[in-house]
Image (cartoon, rainbow, N blue to C red):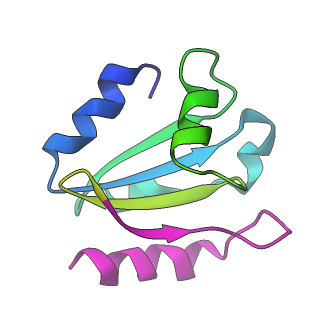
C-alpha cells in the first residue's frame, strides 16, 4: 500500500490481513498472500515516505513485521514477533486462518 486512499479502502473489506514491515527487514516477512483466498491481503512499508511514519504511529507499530487482522475495518487480532523479528510462518498463517473462519 502506497497511499492513504488504499489504507482507507481496507474498511470496505469484510476481512483484511495487513503486514506492516520495513524494506530492511524484508527477509522476515510472512507470505500473507497465501491467505488471499480467505481475505484481502496488503503490505505496508514503514519506510514509505508518504504513509509509513503515520501508519506506524496511528497503528502503534512497535516491531516489524506486525500482522494485523481486520474485520470490516476494525482490528480483531494482532501478531507481533519477539526480539528476533521473525515469525514461524506456518504457525502464523494457521492462526490467521482460524481467526478468520
Residue at the image position 28 percent from the left and 31 percent from the top: 8
Residue 14 coordinates in the image, percent (x, y)? 14, 56
Residue 79 shows up from this direction: yes
Q: Nearer the viewer, residue 80 or 87?
A: 80
Looking at the image, residue 100 sits to the left or right of residue 56; the answer is: left
Residue at the image position 70 percent from the left and 53 percent from the top: 64
Relative vertical location of residue 92 with respect to residue 61 in this rendering, above or below: below
Relative vertical location of residue 73 with respect to residue 34 in this rendering, above or below: above
Residue 52 coordinates in the image, percent (x, y)? 60, 28
Residue 10 coordinates in the image, percent (x, y)? 26, 41
Quarter assignment of residue 68: bottom left
Looking at the image, residue 101 sits to the left or right of residue 84; the answer is: left
In the picture, which quadrant includes the N terminus? top left
Q: Which of 11 and 60 is in front in this view?
A: 60
What span is in magenta? 75-101
Looking at the image, residue 6 sits to the left or right of residue 18; the answer is: left
Residue 96 coordinates in the image, percent (x, y)? 39, 74
Amino acid at each position: 500500500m502506497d497511499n492513504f486512499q488504499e489504507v482507507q479502502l481496507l474498511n470496505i473489506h469484510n476481512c483484511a490481513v495487513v503486514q506492516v514491515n520495513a524494506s530492511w527487514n524484508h527477509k522476515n516477512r510472512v507470505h500473507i498472500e497465501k491467505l488471499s483466498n480467505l481475505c484481502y491481503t496488503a503490505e505496508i512499508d514503514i519506510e514509505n515516505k508518504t504513509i509509513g511514519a503515520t501508519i506506524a504511529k496511528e497503528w502503534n507499530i512497535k516491531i516489524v513485521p506486525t500482522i494485523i487482522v481486520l474485520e470490516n475495518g476494525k482490528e480483531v487480532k494482532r501478531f507481533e514477533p519477539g526480539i528476533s523479528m521473525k515469525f514461524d510462518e506456518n504457525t502464523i498463517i494457521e492462526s490467521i486462518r482460524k481467526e478468520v473462519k
